[in-house]
Image (cartoon, rainbow, N blue to C red):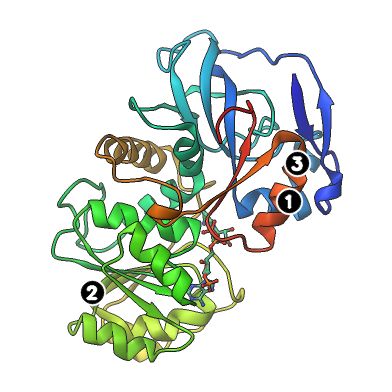
Amino acid sequence: MRSIVYSRTGDSSVLTAIERDLPQPGPGEVRIRVAVSGVNPTDWKARRGGTAVETLGEVTPNQDGAGIVDAVGDGVGSPGVGERVWIHLAQHERPTGTAQEYTVVPAERAVPLPDGIGFDLAASLGVPAMTAHRALTVHEDGPDRLSPGALAGRTVLVAGGAGAVGHAAIQLARWAGATVIATVSSDEKAALARAAGAHHTVDYRSEDTARRILEIAPGGVEHIVEVSPAANFALDTTVLANHGSIAFYADNGGGEATIAVVPAFAKNIRIQGLLMYTVGQRALTAAAEDITAALRDGALPVGEDAGLPLTWFTLDATGAAHDAVESGAVGKVLIDVSGDNR
Ligand SMILES: NC(=O)c1ccc[n+]([C@@H]2O[C@H](COP(=O)([O-])OP(=O)(O)OC[C@H]3O[C@@H](n4cnc5c(N)ncnc54)[C@H](OP(=O)(O)O)[C@@H]3O)[C@@H](O)[C@H]2O)c1
């Protein structure tokens, strides 16, 4: 089978295509014939400077993907052979990412797909949707699970609504009944955030962002999904309601953030970090279950009309796919591994 690998960190030129034997699933694992591999910032960051190659040796990149289970190891009840699945954390603490024709993952990282869900959508879920789910379920007084109505009566601010995580956060918050405000940096990104389901968009580069948000939500927003704490903690503190929460998941815009202490404690603000790799199985299982319910409701479409343009690459062009994500491609970058998904 064809596999993309790297055995030293560096730019995308460290990625090479090789032929290797089919991997066999061990106890508790499943083997998946990969249809589509999804690329996220974490994949190029790990390749460029992560520790995976030191601990794992030769690594096949990409955490997310989708395909069909074609073999299962001892003790696996679900998913079964022939089931269509979406894959998350394929390469977490193991060298078996999705940039290859077959991959082997622990069974709980391969989630059965409802009927009618395409592999393009399925490979877009993983990191973005699970991060968004966690970010929407860690607030004081808010629900720890998502379902229709779970966020009814709440206003959620999604920073960077045209990003991959931002897109998933808008869709899941909207599905759960929240009023959704998204910040964006251009008219084009505003159109994408609205297509994803945002009720309101605010251009943080050209508008008085705090004033606009407080015009929309005069009592403040209950919850914020934050991609750039360094740039936005001051804004967030200003627009949060009493007992509001910030869930932050990235360091875009800088690795140090400051917060105005008195306004933050006077509003009883809660600040919650999150990282998919360390959040724990309970949160991942909850996210997978709720995302499956949202998929059944048709709440997570992809493509330009749904606010997430897709950019496709071939398996042999995995390096170019990584470069596209690293240079800030808008929407979702996907690799058509089986060659029949575009
Ligand atoms: N903690 C975790 O487990 C976890 C999980 C997933 C992703 N991440 C990290 O999260 C980040 C985003 O991932 P992604 O896949 O969503 O990337 P992406 O698709 O490139 O989106 C990034 C978004 O951030 C927005 N942004 C940057 N600065 C902003 C600011 N000051 N205010 C508002 N929006 C701002 C950008 O919008 P503009 O261009 O319009 O500014 C862009 O839409 C990456 O750093 C990734 O490594 C972490």
Taking the image as drawn, is residue 272 in sight? no
Is 30 located above or below residue 261 in the figure?
above
SS of the residue under disc 1:
loop
Dividing the picture into quadrants, the one containing residue 341 is top right
Dot 1 alpha-carbon crowd within 10 angstroms: few under 14, some 14 to 19, many 20 or more? some
Taking the image as drawn, is residue 146 in sight? yes
Mark nearer the N terminus (3 vs 1) = 1
Which of the pair 67/266 is nearer the observer? 67
Is 66 located above or below residue 261 in the figure?
above
Mark nearer the N terminus (3 vs 2) = 2
The circle on residue 104 is none
Dot 2 alpha-carbon crowd within 10 angstroms: few under 14, some 14 to 19, many 20 or more? some
Q: Which residue is mark 1?
A: 50
Estimate the x, y position of residue 32 in percent, counting from the top left: 57, 20
Is 4 located above or below residue 147 in the figure?
above
Q: Nearer the viewer, mark 3 or mark 1?
A: 3
x 61%, y 76%: residue: 254
Q: How many marks?
A: 3
Q: What's the residue type where badge 3 is placed?
A: Ala
SS of the residue under disc 3:
helix
Say whether residue 59 is left or right of residue 152.
right
SS of the residue under disc 2:
strand
x 30%, y 65%: residue: 198
Give the quarter of the figure containing the C terminus. top right
Dividing the picture into quadrants, the one containing residue 65 is top right
Query: Distance from label 3 to label 2 (Cα)?
Result: 47 Å
Q: Which residue is mark 2?
A: 243
Estimate the x, y position of residue 321 in percent, counting from the top left: 69, 48
Mark nearer the N terminus (1 vs 2) = 1
Query: Distance from label 3 to label 1 (Cα)?
Result: 21 Å
The circle on residue 317 is 3
